[in-house]
Structure formats: C-alpha cells, structure tokens
Image: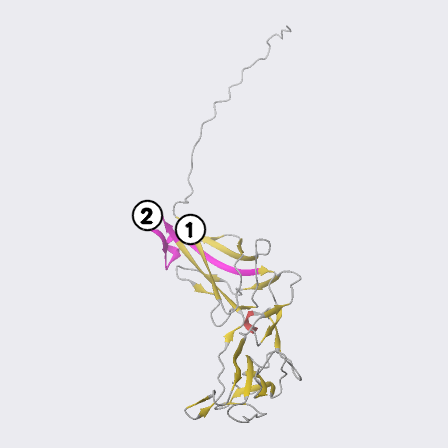
Amino acid sequence: VAKGGGIGIYGFYTGDAAEGWTEATTANLLVNENLYYNGAWTYDNLAYWTNTEDQYTFLAYAPYGHAKVTAPVGTVANPAITYEVDTDLAKQTDLLYSNNAKNVTKAECTTNGTTAVSFQFQHALSRLSVQANAVMYDKTTGQTATSATTEFDNLFTITNITIKGKFNTKGSLNLNTGEWTPVTPTGDTTYDLVTTAQQLDGDFHNFSADENYLMMIPTTFSATNKAILSVTYKINYKGAESAEITKDVEITTDFVKGTAYTIKITLQRDENNAIIFNVQSVDAWNNPENNAGQPVINA
C-alpha cells in the first residue's frame, strides 16, 4: 500500500488515568495519521511509548485518502468518518474499521520482545452480488441445469439488471462504536448491476466478478420501503429474437453491516409449457331462409 493509501489512525494518550480513554477524550497523539506499507508498516509523525504501564487508545479505518471517505482532523473526540456510496460500481470501495485497541499499554502490546499495536478490522458496509443462469425444467427429474440451452432451441440473454430503492447513500461511521448515522434518503437511487449483455447457460454467471460488487451503507427495508430488482432479458427461439422483457422482484431483506448477499436469478423454460391447441366446438352452418315474395301478416 503506497503512501496516501492504507490506513488512517487516531491515537489517544491517557497516561495512568484510572478511567482510561472515554468518548470525551480528544485525539492528542495521532490525528488521521496515514499508516502505509513500505517494506514494513510505517507512518511519518512518529509517536513514542512513555512507559509500559501508561494507557493508549487507537482507532483506525481504511482506505485512507479515498475520494468518498472524509475523516475529521484537528481536535476531535469519538471520531466519525463520512462515507458516500459511488454510483459507479467500478469506483466503489470496501470500508473497514478497527476499535479493538482501547486502553492498551505497551506491556499488553509486547509479545516475545516485539512491541506493536494490533488492529482487527471489521467490514463497515453490506456487499451485494448477482448471479444468473438458464435451465430446462423436467417434471420427472425436477429442475435440470444444462450446459447448452440450444438443445431446446432456446437462448436466454440478460441485457440489464438494476436495483432501486431508498438506499442509505451517505452517512457517518463512528470508529469507536462501529455504528452508522445515515443521511436520510430523499428519494430512490438506482444502481446498474449489469453493464454488458450476457448469454446464459446452466452454470451460474457471476455478474459481480472482478470486484464489481455493490457496496452499500447498511439499510433497513419494510413492507412499505422496498428495494426493487429489475431483470431485463431477451429470448432467442428457433433463431427469432424476442423484444426485451423486464421482470421486477421485491426485496425486503435488510442490508446488515459486514454481511455479503448474493442474489441468484434463474431463467427457466418449462417443457410442459408447449403450445397446444384445443378445438372447443364447430359452429353450425349459417342457412338463412329466402323470404323474398312472401306476404307480410300483421297480427
């Protein structure tokens, strides 16, 4: 990790105070210091241990210096960073934080003669990926995935997948508690989960490969606040291609911090759904009488 990337650190020195660090303690040792890797983990404004018993607290996050991550500087207590979700999946980043090094001493951070503060990072976001395949359904054996859908003169191609809802697109993460304070969304946000059309077969195609995941600030949904997954696809049957078809699916599952979700979509052709014909009846012959020249009788 080059300088300007890596990890951001807040350091607090509380000495031998019995209560140690609290949420009111300001960062007096390190303020948004960049910890980067250059053959070893290092940083520029070196801080020093006073003795083996004094207490220190370190809070950290990563990545440092990202365009969508804003970290407080100057006198700060209980620091929280601001994060904004990029609308372009390719530009999104994972967000990590560590709050395990609270009220530690040099003695507690020394093992076999080596002294170092250890960070245990956690994921602050939710991650969403999407996969899809195409199968043939056999009423005898059940659903059967096939490697060649051309066997059934039937090709499915997904052209677009989007997800829309009142997602939390911006918020602040408390590095001490790991809790989010989201900015209340004012409307729906739509994310494109598929940018290139993909013909499907029986194996699931991972549209989120190459780190093209949707990274989300945790969001709570309900019966009145739903996310809508829209799948647009075309069917090529016996060489003739259909118009685009779009199907919507409601998602009410909450996006929880540190949890990865995979949506699996199956486009299925049913062998029992053949075009059939049923003749209900035959209309009687139309046999009108010829009434020309007959008298009209008025009763």
**Badge 2 density bin: few <14, some 14–19, many ≥20, Cα 10 Å:** few
Amino acid marked by disc 1? Arg
Q: Is residue 10 left or right of residue 122?
A: right
Q: Position of residue 278 (x, y in %)?
A: 42, 35
Bounds of the magenta segment: 136-163
Mark closer to the observer (2, 1): 2
Pick the front one: 255 or 291: 255
Disc ID at residue 68: none
Is residue 94 positioned above or below 128 on the image? below
Q: How many marks?
A: 2
Q: Main secondary structure of the magenta part?
A: strand
Task: Give yes or no for residue 79 being in the magenta stretch.
Answer: no
Amino acid marked by disc 2? Thr
Please name the residue shown 44% across and 92% down the image. Answer: 114
Whether the residues at callouts 2 and 1 have beta carbons within 8 Å, the answer is no
Disc ID at residue 269: 1
Is residue 184 positioned above or below 245 on the image? below
Residue 103 visible? The answer is yes
- What element does badge 2 sit on? loop
Please name the residue shown 63% across and 60% down the image. Answer: 188
Q: CA distance from mark 2 to mark 1?
A: 15 Å
Q: Which residue is mark 2?
A: 140
Pick the front one: 190 or 232: 190
Q: Position of residue 104 (x, y in %)?
A: 51, 85
- What element does badge 1 sit on? strand
